[in-house]
Image (cartoon, grey):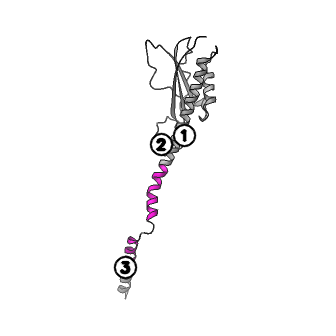
Amino acid sequence: MIRTKLRKITCGFSGRLSRFSRSEEGSGTVEFAITFPVMLLFMLSGVELGMITLQHSMLERAMDLTVRDIRLGTGEDLQHDDIKDRICARAGFIADCSDNLHLEMVQVDPRNWADIPAVPTCTDQSEEVAPVVSFVNGQENELMILRACAKISPVFPSTGLGKNVTTDGAGQFALVSISAFVQEPR
């Protein structure tokens, strides 16, 4: 009697198992569970790339307008803080711009070219504050290079593009804009 009951239970279980393995119910759920994380990763990376592009284009535009002011200025002697304030006022999407923007202005002789350092000097919130570096107001008809480095925090720092971008100790990455101009005669 016990053996027949045991046989019925095993036959019932194996029958259910074989019916379950042949069933196609829930196959859409399996496909969704496999593809959704990948699609979410692409979507979040796209948002991150869009924000990076927006911030970089705003920094470039702010640099262009500010360099135009410097170049065509009517005898106005702009100093580091003035230029930084003008760039920050025009770069709307850079958070804490006055704290996260670092400027370098270097005079370059076009006849005896010496490159500026390849790696820009940027702020790093995880380190001590560094003084202003390499900022020289040029004289008339001198070639000047202005380089701005803005530190930006990723929107999604633990996912996709935000995770794979090179960051500093504070978790920020650098956006760099370079502009060259000649000081006009006054």
SS type, badge 3:
helix
Element marked by disc 1: helix
Total number of numbered labels? 3
Residue 74's tag is none
Q: CA distance from mark 3 to mark 2?
A: 52 Å
Q: Position of residue 183 (x, y in %)?
A: 56, 14
Q: Is residue 32 left or right of residue 4?
A: right
Query: Is 155 placed left or right of 7 in the picture?
Result: right
Residue marked by disc 1: 51
Left or right: residue 27 versus residue 106 is left
Q: Is 3 situated above or below 70?
A: below
Q: Which residues are magenta?
A: 12-41
User: Would you say the residues marked 1 and 3 are in contact, meaning their CB atoms lie under 8 Å apart?
Assistant: no
Query: Residue 3 placed where, x, y %?
Result: 35, 85
Q: Earlier in the sequence, mark 2 or mark 1?
A: 1
Residue flagged by tag 2: what amino acid is it? Leu
Residue at point 47%, 52% (across, down): 39
Horizontal and vertical percent position of residue 93? 60, 36
Q: Secondary structure at mark 2?
A: helix
The C terminus sits in image quarter: top right
Q: Quadrant of residue 79?
A: top right
